Amino acid sequence: NGDNMLERSANMPWYKGPTLIEALDAIHPPKRPVDKPLRLPLQDVYKIGGIGTVPVGRVETGILKPGMTVVFAPVGVSSEVKSVEMHHESIPQALPGDNVGFNVKNIAVKDIHRGNVCGDAKNDPPCKTESFEAQVIVMNHPSGIRPGYTPVLDCHTAHIA
């Protein structure tokens, strides 16, 4: 119920655009960047009894599959992916946008952390850097920024004080 929702309305002769449903139908989903190297920032790392170490995060680019060798930056730890799960179900691969957990061989929970980035060890693996340029936006700072101030940096899933 409403003008120009499902069909054009005579009540709005001044409006020449599409109906709401036409506008929604014209939206195309963005292309998933599967052709880029794997980048998966870790949101957390769990130790699950009988299974082992399970990092979790959202695939930003690339594809994550069981059997592939991955490396975690900046710690430099590498491992083989034993399995990939989404919503407690095993999947053959994870694509950009998928929130997944994946089991890795021979890595202890203490070896990798939230904020580390997982990538394909054989295709442009992620690495640490000494510096980078960033555009910084201060959202709200009631007391102001003064000499000696120690900022907190949130970058993807990392929280650094």
Image: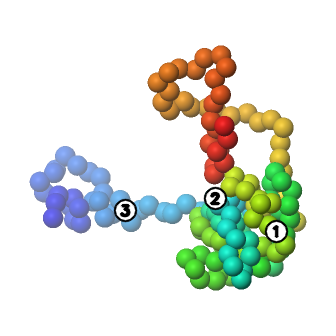
* Residue 47 can be seen in this image: yes
**10 Å neighbourhood of mark 1: few (<14), some, or many (≥20)?**
some
- Label for residue 43? 2
Eye-nearest disc, 3 or 2: 2
Residue marked by disc 1: 107
Residue 104: x %, y % from top left: 78, 73
The residue depicted at 64 percent of the width and 81 percent of the height is: 91
Report the front residue among 120 and 73. Answer: 73
> In the drawing, does residue 152 fall left or right of residue 74?
left
**10 Å neighbourhood of mark 3: few (<14), some, or many (≥20)?**
few
Between the C-alphas of marks 1 and 3, the distance is: 46 Å
Eye-nearest disc, 1 or 2: 1
Q: Which quarter of the rendered picture does the C terminus lie within?
A: top right
- Label for residue 24? 3
Report the front residue among 77 and 9. Answer: 77
Report the front residue among 60 and 27. Answer: 60
**10 Å neighbourhood of mark 2: few (<14), some, or many (≥20)?**
some
- Which comes sooner in the sequence, label 3 or label 2? 3
Between the C-alphas of marks 1 and 2, the distance is: 17 Å
Report the front residue among 54 and 29. Answer: 54
Q: Are discs 1 and 3 less than 8 Å apart at CB?
A: no
Between the C-alphas of marks 3 and 2, the distance is: 32 Å
Considering every residue shown, the one lying at the far left of the view is 11
Q: Which quarter of the rendered picture does the N terminus lie within?
A: bottom left
Eye-nearest disc, 1 or 3: 1
* Residue 59 can be seen in this image: no
The residue depicted at 65 percent of the width and 28 percent of the height is: 150
Identify which amino acid the numbered label 1 is placed on.
Ile
Identify which amino acid the numbered label 2 is placed on.
Gln
Residue 143: x %, y % from top left: 50, 21
Task: Give the answer, above or below, for where 91 lies relative to 131.
Answer: below
